[in-house]
Image (spheres, grey):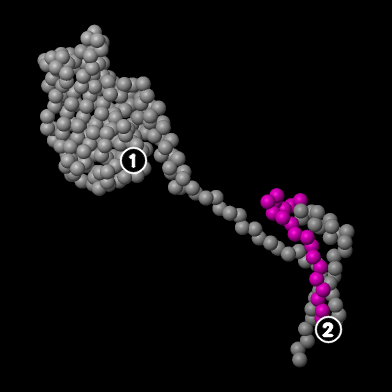
Amino acid sequence: MTGFMITVQPPIPGPHLVTSITRISKMMRPHRTVPATQRKTINTRFGDYQIWFRPIYTTKVAEPSSGLVDDGKETLEQIKADLYQAVKDINKGIFGVSSAKKSEIESLVKQLESQNPTPCPTSNLDKVGGCWKLVYSTITILGSKRTKLGLRDFITLGDFFQTIDVAKSKAVNVIEFNVKGLNLLKGQLTIEASFKIASKSRVDISYDHSRITPDQLMYMFRNNYDLLLGIFNPEGWLELSYVDGTMRIGRDDKGNVFILEKS
């Protein structure tokens, strides 16, 4: 039989043990817990021996949750809030805005478009249908156009509404006007159009007809009616670049951007 030897480390004296533990404790990082030293007796044919050992524990630190879904929703709502703040008090941008303001709005619009919750809006026209109110557009009435239309002091623009009838593939745009000096006469330009689906996110729009009511307002615009219609005529195509339950963003073939809120 082959002989063998067991080498057993003699017990660590108490004072030395305390000193060792103290040193080790100081060297350990704060987030680790140092377990107490334990004693164990080993029985061999040469006698019983006691050994000292320190058990090792590992602690698994929970990984932080990415929170992509919740954070994404919060980010989307924050961008929308920033966008509403950016378009506040600029009269829908119809009479122009500074280049800095325009860039700010465009940046926020692109952020929303990159997170569009309805990537195929023409397959979800129930989200598109109903009445919408324009809050911003890059369509502008400036210089001589504004003067000819009397939109400097005499006539002011009111709200812009768009009603989409999905079942009939119809869209009705209403632009409201207020006329000073005539007991605050109120009127509107109504433009009716038809649309058909061109792609998963685009519709083609055809002009049907338009009218101005009441007659007094039509009389005031009679010499510049074509100019007025040319500004607001929706004919062409419209890309539905962002759609959710309360906001819609579109880009047309003329390079204009439209931001609308559900009315």
- Mark 1 vs mark 2, CA separation in Å: 81 Å
Question: Residue 117 location in percent, x, y?
Answer: 34, 44
Mark identifier at residue 244: 1
Question: Residue 71 location in percent, x, y?
Answer: 46, 43
Residue at 41% of width from left, 31% of height from top?
Answer: 82
Q: Is residue 170 above or below residue 90?
A: below
Residue at 78% of width from left, 86% of height from top?
Answer: 3
Label 1 sits on what residue type?
Asp
Magenta part of the protein: which range? 26-44
Q: Is residue 27 left or right of residue 137?
A: right
Residue at 84% of width from left, 57% of height from top?
Answer: 18
Circle count: 2
The local secondary structure at tag 1 comes to loop
Question: Residue 43 location in percent, x, y?
Answer: 82, 79
Tag 2 residue: 45
Of labels 1 and 2, earlier in sequence is 2
Q: Is residue 152 above or below residue 49?
A: above
Q: Is residue 13 above or below residue 62?
A: below
Q: Is residue 225 above or below residue 55?
A: above
> 10 Å neighbourhood of mark 2: few (<14), some, or many (≥20)?
few
The local secondary structure at tag 2 comes to loop
Question: Residue 15 location in percent, x, y?
Answer: 88, 59
Q: In this view, which residue lies farthest toward the top?
A: 181
Q: Is residue 226 magenta?
A: no
Of 81 and 188, the residue lying toward us: 188
Label 2 sits on what residue type?
Arg
Task: Give the image quarter of residue 114.
Answer: top left
Q: Is residue 263 visible?
A: yes
> 10 Å neighbourhood of mark 1: few (<14), some, or many (≥20)?
some
